[in-house]
């Protein structure tokens, strides 16, 4: 799907983009220009439609990486006297806890294994044990392992127990189904450089309008005040502070390609084919995925590292990169792993080429896999 000699990024973002997306960044835009502000507005409308949020939700774009928008959502939408439950099965869940600690918001951690999804039974047990819980901050797809948490069931549970749900959908938005119109979700946070196949630099929060309007004055941050960003854009059509103009233009081009491909269903199906080809090809080499297939998301796959003493991730990474593919280090503490992304402007053939490159790298490094 791409051309040129640049390496293919098999990572969860930044990721490999199309020439058309990169081409969109060759034009300069004025931040006050009406055409640029109309482009921002069109992006927000498209993002709302991806999660069926046109009726009761608004989209607030934010400068910076996805974490900036996660912190903006937590700092703006969660009252200071709230108590937030964070089901924790990975590094990005842990990041939610760190953000809440910095914000001075009380949090309760539901500790889970790296391969254990956030089950509704465990969450509801916490609701009953800790009735002071007001909010849940849930990572939809925990990319430290590639684990998919059951968002629909968690949202339904939060609705039953009258808890507010804020979803970090950084690595799932656009590829996996999310429907905020079903109820139970107050906000969904994601970013430009993930499954929408834009470039990094812009996040966004899709938030229930009534919740956002009630959040005026809650944020302790100037730059990360979600309500102020929304109110200013409503009044002027402009971003409060200098927008990442080239990133926005690239996202507009990426969304045009997203719609042409067939939207969420088609994007998710391509990533699923990529993931299947990757796992099948790696299994033929002798690699085992860390996760059970039932909880494996088609975005990034964690593999157990070879046990051969000749294996060294840095040398392995460099050998595979020299062959044209960029892998990702493992992020688990208990077992040695590495990760291979399935997303970006790539197809199943590219995944098979990556497996072949991995095979050649192992041979060059004299690394053997256990039978």
Image (tube, rainbow, N blue to C red):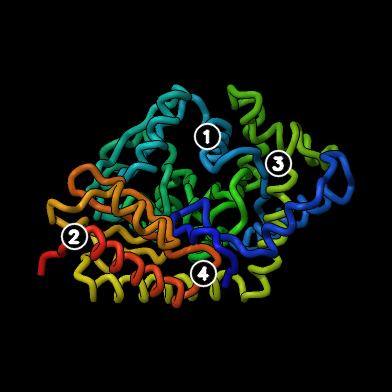
According to the picture, the residue beneath numbered tag 3 turns out to be: 244
Alpha-carbon neighbours of circle 3 within 10 Å: few (<14), some, or many (≥20)? some
Alpha-carbon distance for marks 2 and 1? 42 Å
According to the picture, the residue beneath numbered tag 1 turns out to be: 71
Q: Which mark is residue 367?
A: 2
Which residue is depicted at the point 42% across and 56% down? 326
Disc number lying in front (4 or 3)? 4
Q: Is residue 321 above or below residue 227?
A: below
Q: In this view, does 87 lie to the left or right of 306?
A: right
Q: What secondary structure is marked by label 2?
A: loop
Disc number lying in front (2 or 4)? 2
Q: Which mark is residue 346?
A: 4
Which residue is depicted at the point 44% across and 30% down? 99
Which residue is depicted at the point 64% across and 30% down? 225
| Dot 2 or dot 1, earlier in sequence | 1
Q: In this view, does 355 lie above or below 89?
A: below
Alpha-carbon distance for marks 3 and 1? 18 Å
| Dot 3 or dot 1, earlier in sequence | 1
Alpha-carbon distance for marks 2 and 4? 27 Å
Instruction: Tell me the quadrant of the picture where the N terminus can be found.
Output: bottom right
Disc number lying in front (2 or 1)? 2
Disc number lying in front (3 or 1)? 3
């Amino acid at each position: 799907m791409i051309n040129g000699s640049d390496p293919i990024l098999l990572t969860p973002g930044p990721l490999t983009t199309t020439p058309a997306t990169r081409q969109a960044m060759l034009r300069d835009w004025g931040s006050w220009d009406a055409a640029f502000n109309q482009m921002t507005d069109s992006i927000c409308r498209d993002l709302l439609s991806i999660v069926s949020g046109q009726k009761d939700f608004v989209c607030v774009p934010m400068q910076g990486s996805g974490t900036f928008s996660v912190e903006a959502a937590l700092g703006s939408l969660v009252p200071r006297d709230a108590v937030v439950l964070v089901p924790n099965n990975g590094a990005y869940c842990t990041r939610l806890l760190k953000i809440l600690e910095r914000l001075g918001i009380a949090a309760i951690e539901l500790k889970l294994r790296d391969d254990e999804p956030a089950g509704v039974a465990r969450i509801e047990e916490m609701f009953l044990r800790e009735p002071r819980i007001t909010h849940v901050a849930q990572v939809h797809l925990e990319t430290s392992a590639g684990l998919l948490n059951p968002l629909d069931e968690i949202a339904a549970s939060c609705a039953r127990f009258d808890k507010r749900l804020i979803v970090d959908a950084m690595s799932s938005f656009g590829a996996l189904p999310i429907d905020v119109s079903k109820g139970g979700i107050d906000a969904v946070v994601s970013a430009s450089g993930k499954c929408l196949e834009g470039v990094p630099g812009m996040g966004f929060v899709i938030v229930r309008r009534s919740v956002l309007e009630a959040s005026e004055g809650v944020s302790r941050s100037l730059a990360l005040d979600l309500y102020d960003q929304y109110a200013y854009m409503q009044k002027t059509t402009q971003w409060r502070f200098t927008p990442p103009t080239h990133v926005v233009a690239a996202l507009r081009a990426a969304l045009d390609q997203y719609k042409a491909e067939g939207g969420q269903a088609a994007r998710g199906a391509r990533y699923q084919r990529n993931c299947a080809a990757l796992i099948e090809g790696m299994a033929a080499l002798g690699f085992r995925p860390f996760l059970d297939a039932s909880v494996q998301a088609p975005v990034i796959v964690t593999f157990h590292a070879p046990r051969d003493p000749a294996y060294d991730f840095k040398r392995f990474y460099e050998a595979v990169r020299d062959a044209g593919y960029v892998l990702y280090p493992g992020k688990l503490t208990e077992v040695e792993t590495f990760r291979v992304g399935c997303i970006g402007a790539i197809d199943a053939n590219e995944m098979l080429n990556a497996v072949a490159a991995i095979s050649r790298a192992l041979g060059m490094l004299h690394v053997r896999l256990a039978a």
